[in-house]
Image (cartoon, rainbow, N blue to C red):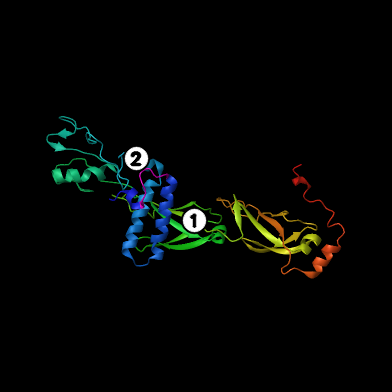
Amino acid sequence: MKDPYTVLGVSRSAAQDDIKKAYRKLAKELHPDKNPGNAKVAERFKEISAAYHLLGDEKQRKRYDRGEIDAGGAERAPQGGFNRANTRGGPRGFDNGNFDFSFTGGEAGAAEDLFADLFGAFRRGQTGAGARGQRPFRARGSDLRYSLSVGFLESARGGTRRVSLPGGKTLDVKIPAGVGDGQQIRLKGQGEPGEGGAPAGDALVEVHVEPHPFFATKDHDVHVELPVSLQEAVLGAKIQVPTIDGMVSLTVPKGSNTGTTLRLKGRGLHDRAGSRRGDQYVKLKIVLPEPADAELERFAKSWSQGSGADLRSRFNLD
């Protein structure tokens, strides 16, 4: 199995963020959706997913660096001996010339081939003539990691996206309303199959939310800067405002100014439990007409109070 650092093209001293960036870049290039029917690319995508599954987890990465697990996440055989069961009638691990070894989880994966070469009888799920009490090899399947890009409104409203996995398998991924950038969706039992009847691993789908041209978020609140005319700001008006649910009516108070912020309660994002929603904040920005309006210019020149207001007095450095 290839070294995961080599697979992702990073050094062993790379920071976790660099590993994540390398995976995201490769996943975007090699995703099966962008390379339909290309078996080589699908296999490469599977390799980088497995490599990130190991190196993306700091604890697993440290264990790999220490040599405790291999590139596939399986336990390596302990140095200086094997995990042998005590038996009757002789030295530890021996009984009248018969060998009695017991393995669980990843230990068997590292030592099994060694014993097969020596004795020719140690195989997964097989009981040889000279092996007593051997337990079948069991290991939960590995988790697989995937990356999924969704639009802002899709992440805000929720929905279902059909994705293609390596090997041609397709899954319908339910996107919960309000999912945030970088959050994971766990698909139970959709990872690698288990060994010896053990359960399959899970598929971990990391969601990347594409930025929106005018919506922004902070926690569960949505923010938007909205242009209003001078007339609407001075006299007040009812205007239509975009929200993640569609257009709604909003009252602009008389005498509003650039920077005035109005709240639309309950128009933000859903929380993960779906029990509450944030708010939407609308920040007003007064925009003059283009091209310049001659009537407005005449009014400004004749406006007696326009030149008398000292709007910048607080910026005086004296």
Magenta-colored stretch includes residue 178: no
Q: Nearer the viewer, residue 250 or 274?
A: 250
Q: Is 13 rendered above or below residue 90? A: below
The image's mark for residue 195 is: none
Query: Is 265 displayed left or right of 142 in the figure?
Result: right
Q: Position of residue 294 (x, y in %)?
A: 79, 70
Q: Is residue 315 visible?
A: yes
* Position above or below: 66 against 50: above
Residue 173 percent location from the top left of the image? 46, 59
Amino acid identity at mark 1 = His
Residue 185, x across and y down, in percent = 47, 53
Q: Which residue is mark 2?
A: 63
Which amino acid, by three-letter code, is at mark 2? Arg
**The residue positioned farthest toward the front in the image shown:** 318
Q: Is residue 252 left or right of residue 92?
A: right
Which residue is at a point 43% across and 50% down the rendered structure image? Answer: 20
* Mark 2 vs mark 1, CA separation in Å: 28 Å
Q: Which residue is mark 1?
A: 208
Q: How many marks?
A: 2
Residue at image coords 73%, 56%: 258
Q: Quadrant of residue 222?
A: bottom right
Q: Which callout, 2 or 1, points at the residue further toward the start of the chain? A: 2
Extent of the magenta region = 8-15
Q: Nearer the viewer, residue 168 or 92?
A: 168
- Secondary structure under badge 1? strand
Q: Residues within 10 Å of mark 1 (few under 14, many from 20)?
A: many
Q: Quadrant of the C terminus?
A: top right
The local crowd at label 2, few if under 14, some if 14 to 19, many if 20 or more residues have their Cα within 10 Å, is some
